Image: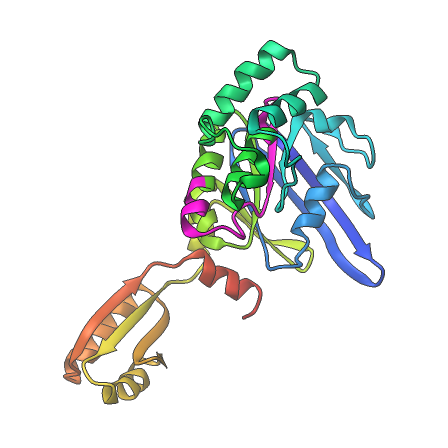
Amino acid sequence: MNILEVKDLHKSFGSKTVLDGLTFSVSEGSVFGFIGRNGAGKTTTMKMILGLLQPGSGEITVCGERVRYGNTPTNKYVGCLPDVPEFYSYMTAREYLRLCGEVTGMKQSEIKKRSGELLELVGLANEKHRIKGYSRGMKQRLGIAQALINKPRLLICDEPTSALDPLGRKEILEIISSARGETSVIFSTHILSDVEKICDDTAILEKGRIALCGTVSELKAKRSGSDVQIVPASAGDAEKTAQLLGGEVHSGTVIVKNASQDKMLSILKTISENRIPILKIEHTEPDLEQLFMEVIGK
């Protein structure tokens, strides 16, 4: 079952077209990576899913119900973590979650139980300070807790790791990944390594449309081959090696792009026949960054 379906979505701001026939879906219980360069339309799409922005045309459904601009009833199924969450800074985490639970109509006993579970999940169970003293990472963790308070069917995370240090990013990714057991997640980001770590399915947004969509392994398989990196023993051999192999030199390393296994054997034969001393040769696996750069033409 698809929790979210976006069909032929269009949106322009003046003469600038942001979305041009955007279509994708998020299946139940999955983490869906929604990636694209800054300004590609990711946040615009998130706002439309929440009914905060009116599409030019197209249709969005959440749990089979159509999203409508304004006071849309589908938001009862949705939890949202914006890229920069805001809180009442004078509250504690428990006080804030109690407020969120009351707003969604939860019973006090349910709020107390759910708040304890979520604060344990996000690592804030023993935090007594008021929110004004929280770090950026702590606020992101509390943001996930508030987004999950009423057990939504869909969790929207709009670039939740963009301003965090490596440890903070790791913690947030682990929390999002652990949430997939009770909700579906749409994870908007431009940090491609994060997508590779936690996403089941991924879509690359470019020029207002989905350029590629599939699992991470399926997307990687769309590249014709891996790259081969060769480090000659002397810098003077790099140019000669590149000419022989049809590669490029980057900082003393020869790179042969999109090399199949047969090409790798040919490279080894050429190196041996020309008696080129090397320090290292590596057949690197394709990654999302390489594919993404190819999609956007960089």
- Residue drawn at (23%, 87%), measured in percent from left and top? 237
The magenta stretch is 147-171
- Residue drawn at (34%, 74%), measured in percent from left and top? 255
Residue 15 placement (x, y as % from top left) = 83, 63
Does 7 sit above or below residue 65?
below
Does 196 sit above or below residue 97?
below
Residue 259, quarter of the rendered image = bottom left
**Colour scheme used in the picture?**
rainbow
User: In front here: 69 or 172?
Assistant: 172
Residue 148 falls within the magenta-colored stretch: yes
Side (left or right) of 279 relative to 253 = left
Residue 86 placement (x, y as % from top left) = 65, 40
Residue 180 falls within the magenta-colored stretch: no
Residue 224, quarter of the rendered image = bottom left
Side (left or right) of 113 relative to 178 = right
Does 278 sit above or below residue 205?
below
> Can you see residue 50?
yes
> Can you see residue 152?
no
Residue 236 placement (x, y as % from top left) = 24, 89
Residue 280 placement (x, y as % from top left) = 20, 71
- Residue drawn at (29%, 71%), measured in percent from left and top? 229
